[in-house]
Image (cartoon, coloured by chain):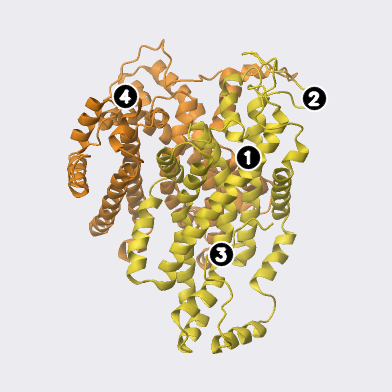
Chain colours: A orange, B yellow
Amino acid sequence: MLRFVVRRLALVVPVLVGLSVLLFLWLRALPGDPARAMLGQRATPESIAVVNEQYGFDQPLLQQFLIYAGQLLQGNLGSSTQTGEPVVSSFLLRFPATIELSLAALLFAIILGIPLGYYAARHNGGILDTFAVGGSLLGVCVPVFFLAYLLKLVFAVGIDLDLGLFNLKDLGFLPSTGRQSIRMDATHITNFYVLDGLLTREWDAMWDAMLHLVLPAIALGTIPLAIIVRITRASVIEVIHDDYVRTAEAKGLAASLIRRRHVLRNAMLPVATTIGLQTGLLFSGAVLTETVFSFNGIGSYLFDAIGQLDYAVLQGYILFIALSYALINLLVDISYGLIDPRVRVS
Amino acid sequence: MSVLPPPPSGSAESVEPMTIDDLVGHVGHDDERGVSLWRGAWRRLRRNPSAIIGAALMGLFILVALFAPLIAGHEPGQPIANSGVTPSSVPGPSEEYPWGLDSTGVDLQTQIVFGARQSLLIGVVSTSLGLSVGATIGLLAGGFGGKVDLIVMRFVDILLSIPSLLLAVSIAAILGQSQTSVMIAIGAAQVPIFARLLRGSLLQQRASDYVLASWSLGLRRRTVVMNHMLPNSLGPVIVQATLTLATAIIEVAALSFLGLGDPNPSAAEWGRMLVQAQNRLQSDPHLALLPGICIAVTALGFTLFGEALREALDPKSRR
């Protein structure tokens, strides 16, 4: 198992090296003077000189790369050209919010998606199956930020529309922006607000943070949900028809045992891979979702950076995401090894 | 529904005189019992309700896009003087403007109709770009292999570790705001996907008996790859192109949302309409609902059709 992990870890290194080279060239591909482009309107001869000094833009290309690589190895992703803050510290400050949101979204997608996909597969061709398949196709087609708007409109802002039984405005009870009510005087230790509430036993603060997570998590989790439903369904349908399931049935095993041990366990392999692959989707979706809900994570930070063409932040963000993506998929591979012993050997 | 570009260069019929491979290809074709892959797929597609719904939605969208000037009553992006737009409300439907005006004082129906045209244009151009470049890379890597394969695919792997929206954002950020840069950004973000797909598809063919037979007849590598392996590997690529059109339409909207869209106000664009409507959600939700629904329904049409095509081309996947 350890050798398996080390071997997989070794595969991540060339990808990251290649990516950093690519991102290095990307910044140099900017039209005109990179220092001027990075500074935008704040470009004065003095500030250009400072940036040239910092990034070594006036040095030969190879030397520039060595400077850049050296900084990367020290964990330095440069500073925002707009605020002057180091990119890494801004990320670390805001990353807990995005992790919290992504986990909530993923939880929503998994808890709803796997049973739904499983049920749809068991009742292949039935009404619920048709709805699950159709709904999951629609789910990937709705632009994330449009869905976020809609959720915000109906469940936070509220529409004044009398439906006879109840007024649609009554649905608008959830908070629409931020991570916690401003009134809430909560103590923050880790910057994971829900976890903070748990640690400090400020239950009302924790509940408040959770309520703030509901809508953004649904908006962000809908595409992963749709994908998980489809993969689970397809995978279960395939496994149900496998020989070993028929054998298990023939030898008279209890149906529930077959479902758990034979069907679900084998069907989960592609699902686990899929969940890992959602990381990239979650981080890019977070840019849209966090912006709509004014959720102060790295997504909304990137949104601001894009608006101001803050290349240092954009560069850092992409590297950061690719790193997280590689690490999470490493974890998925390891979990694959745990679920299916055959993977470890081969 | 021929919205796809021709396959990448070189796959056109060769001008060589009749060779043994033509004969072999010919015999192989006649010898087939039952129906060919594409004819069988067409037969399955016609019977699949979701394919029909998808095709209908696609057809509607393409018709509206093509005949936009005939359907819309006005010029796109032309604000009406004294339109009566206030910060809290927009004028409702009238005889002149059947769906009312949008927040910039432009006829809403015209904007929606021309938005279809814009989406189709960007979608087709960017998908063609991603398809042609990506498929060429995939063809070189998968068909000819060796060192090229190793180097190119590492590169593709790296690009695949960046979410396609962010890849598009980073390219659009360099190219600046224009319609062309939106097309290039979205197209370029699809390149690694097409490259990996065609390469994988070609590698699968490599082990087939017919490829082995072609080799053993002493055919040149170029002939085997171009005339035999490539035509048999295109199925998944065509499916992906259909699905990519849906992604492209959604990503255009996302780029607009992020402020990297086409800044030209006379080009009606659904994503930008959505963004402009966000401050009026409570007073005039229809301003956001209409473009949002248009994006979703159009994307759904391409997705339904693409998925049905995938099933039709790969009968094994159906149970």
The image quadrant where one finds the N terminus of chain A is bottom left
Residue at 49% across, 35% down: A220
Q: Quick one: label 1 or label 3, which is nearer the N terminus? A: 3
Q: Residue A317 versus residue A160: which sits nearer the camera?
A: A317
The disc labelled 4 sits on which kind of residue?
Arg
Q: Which mark is residue B96?
A: 2
Depth check, mark 3 against mark 2: the one in front is 2
Few, some or many residues within 10 Å of mark 1 (<14, 14–19, 20+):
many
The disc labelled 1 sits on which kind of residue?
Ala
Label 3 residue SS: loop
Query: Which chain is disc 4 placed on?
Result: A
The disc labelled 2 sits on which kind of residue?
Glu
Please name the residue that numbered disc 4 is placed on: A42
Q: Residue B226 versus residue A154: which sits nearer the camera?
A: B226
Please name the residue that numbered disc 3 is placed on: B7
Q: Residue A54 versus residue A227: which sits nearer the camera?
A: A54
Query: Which chain is disc 1 placed on?
Result: B
Q: How many numbered discs?
A: 4
The image quadrant where one finds the C terminus of chain A is bottom left
Please name the residue that numbered disc 1 is placed on: B296
Label 2 residue SS: loop
| Snapshot quadrant of residue A210 | top left
Depth check, mark 2 against mark 1: the one in front is 2
Depth check, mark 4 against mark 2: the one in front is 4
Few, some or many residues within 10 Å of mark 4 (<14, 14–19, 20+):
few
Few, some or many residues within 10 Å of mark 3 (<14, 14–19, 20+):
some
State whether residue B278 is above or below residue B122.
above
Query: Which chain is disc 3 placed on?
Result: B
- Residue A179: % across, % down: 42, 22
- How far, Cα to Cα, is label 3 from label 2? 46 Å
Label 1 residue SS: helix
| Snapshot quadrant of residue B39 | bottom right
